[in-house]
Image (cartoon, rainbow, N blue to C red):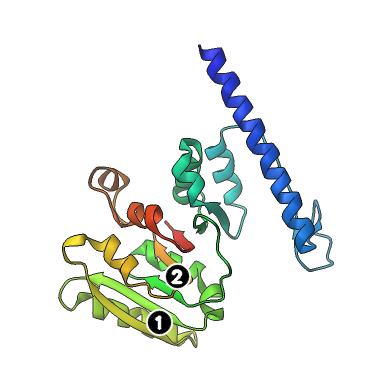
Amino acid sequence: VLQEIMAAAEREAAQRAKASRALFDRVTAAEGVRLVEAPDGQGGLTAAFEEALGREDEMVARRARLSDLIVMGNHEAQKSVSVGMTLEAVLLEGGRPLLIAPPGGAADFAGPVAVAWNGSVEASRAVAAAMPFLSAAPRITVVAVGEDDQPTALAQGLSRFLAWHGLEAETKAVRAGGEGVGPALLAALGDAGLLVMGAYTHSRFRQLVFGGVTRHVLANAGLPVLVSH
């Protein structure tokens, strides 16, 4: 039985590798991307394809530490246990921001950007990683979810910080209500084309048992989400 399981896993891995290479070749050819194995000093958009053997979550998390940004598809994580494990490993052990694409992909990243702000270390790291996106955004909205006057003060604090970087941001204070923070946050995004947020600001055990904003957003967001832990 074990041999059959291993053989099935190897077949699945081989099929995914073949499909990944076919997609890579199709996209790079369509977009005129130069294929290189090392920096050649010529500039422009380049790409390289690498295939490695090992545990997927460990291998990708290790390579993430030598990357500026990691991009993964959330729809695959919902269908595949191994991809879900890889997404979590990159997020918690990669040390770099993770951009999660929604099912079907995204048309572009040129639209408004929403920042979910709760004042946490994780959210601060996400904002720092998102500065190139924020600088290019036509509109920035800081969304803070909480109770009483806390969301207003939080949102205004980040808005002042962004102003020091020459970025103007709207603020939106939202009360969670009975539906919880996750649904309230997603309902407040409006026409945003990108959501920036910290991930797992509470312990993973608490998120697993009680649910949490990170798990809800990753499972239900219909737009790209830039997260950092």
Residue 166 % position (x, y): 49, 88
At 61% across and 56% down in the image, what residue appears? 67
On the question of residue 157 being in view, the answer is yes
At 28% across and 48% down in the image, what residue appears? 207
- Give the secondary structure at mark 2: helix
Toward the top, the furthest residue is 1
Residue 226 % position (x, y): 48, 63
At 76% across and 50% down in the image, what residue appears? 25
Residue 181 % position (x, y): 25, 63
How packed is label 2: few (under 14 Cα within 10 Å), some, or many (20 or more)? Answer: many
Q: In terms of sequence position, does the residue under pointer 1 or pointer 2 come before the other?
A: 2
Q: Is residue 36 above or below residue 4?
A: below
Q: Amino acid at mark 2?
A: Val
Q: Nearer the viewer, residue 181 or 156?
A: 181
Instruction: Tell me where residue 109 sits by quadrant.
Output: bottom right
Q: Give the spatial CA distance, label 1 vs label 2.
A: 10 Å
User: With 42 as the anchor, is 144 left or right in this view?
Assistant: left
At 27% across and 49% down in the image, what residue appears? 211
How packed is label 1: few (under 14 Cα within 10 Å), some, or many (20 or more)? Answer: few
Q: Which mark is residue 127?
A: 2
Q: Is residue 131 above or below residue 56?
A: below
Q: Which mark is residue 161?
A: 1
Instruction: Tell me where residue 4 sits by quadrant.
Output: top right
Q: Quadrant of the C terminus?
A: bottom left
- Give the secondary structure at mark 1: helix
On the question of residue 48 being in view, the answer is no
Q: Amino acid at mark 1?
A: Phe
Q: In this figure, what is the number of numbered marks?
A: 2
Residue 173 % position (x, y): 26, 78
Q: Which mark is residue 177?
A: none
Q: Is residue 144 above or below residue 33?
A: below
The answer to whether mark 1 and mark 2 are in CB contact below 8 A is: yes
